[in-house]
Amino acid sequence: MPKTVADVMSRDPIVVREETPLKEAIQILAERHISGLPVVDDLGKLVGIISETDLMWQETGVTPPAYIMFLDSVIYLKNPATYDRDLHKALGQTVGEVMSKNPIAISPDKTLREAATIMHDRSVHRLPVLESTGQVIGILTRGDIIRAMAASQD
């Protein structure tokens, strides 16, 4: 019988709230040697995820989008909305200002094959695991899947 997400996920993951100071989230990531945290509201429902990728803007900064002038008009060569989003992340002071919204999540009854496919196709490194009420009950990482693969070869 194929393993499910519930069989290998990490239960009761560390979570943060939108109002959590960014410094605190960075400290948690560094001390626990993890690369991302689910972000929940006051009811424990998933509202976002903060990862190392989101935090890179804090260190690298952003470059304004390239543009050309044509007949007294500015034509952006890249979407200026992307610049606004990235600038907001670079200047953010709370988790809510920097997190990725609408994270991809999974239910505990899905197979590891389904989870691996989602992670691969959507280029994500972790999936918050949600019960039917939307509460975060676990987190599944690529490392969890690799460890399950290794254990099944024994």
Image (cartoon, rainbow, N blue to C red):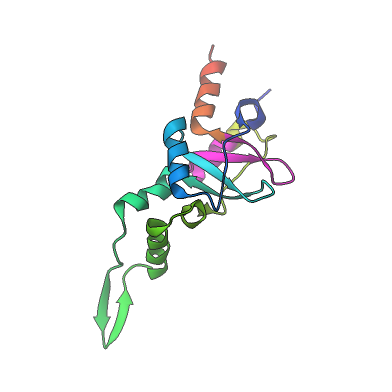
Front residue of 18/114: it is 18
Residue at coordinates 69% horizontally, 43% vertically from top-left?
135
Tally the marks: 0
Residue at coordinates 44% horizontally, 32% vertically from top-left?
31
In the picture, measured across the screen, residue 98 lies left or right of residue 16, that is left
Quadrant in which residue 132 is drawn: top right
Residue 138 included in the magenta stretch of the image: yes
Expressed as whole percent of the image width and height from the top left, the position of residue 147 reads 51, 22
Expressed as whole percent of the image width and height from the top left, the position of residue 34 reads 46, 34
In the picture, measured across the screen, residue 54 lies left or right of residue 64, that is right
* Residue 77 in view of the camera: yes
Expressed as whole percent of the image width and height from the top left, the position of residue 47 reads 60, 52
Q: Quadrant of the N terminus?
A: top right
> Farthest residue in the bottom direction?
71
Quadrant in which residue 6 is drawn: top right
Which portion, as a residue range, is magenta? 115-139
Residue at coordinates 51% horizontally, 18% vertically from top-left?
150
* Residue 123 in view of the camera: no
Q: Determine whether 11 is above or below 154 in the image.
A: below
Front residue of 84/122: it is 84
Expressed as whole percent of the image width and height from the top left, the position of residue 49 reads 53, 47
Quadrant in which residue 137 is drawn: top right
Q: Quadrant of the C terminus?
A: top right
Residue 22 included in the magenta stretch of the image: no
Q: Determine whether 150 is above or below 75 in the image.
A: above
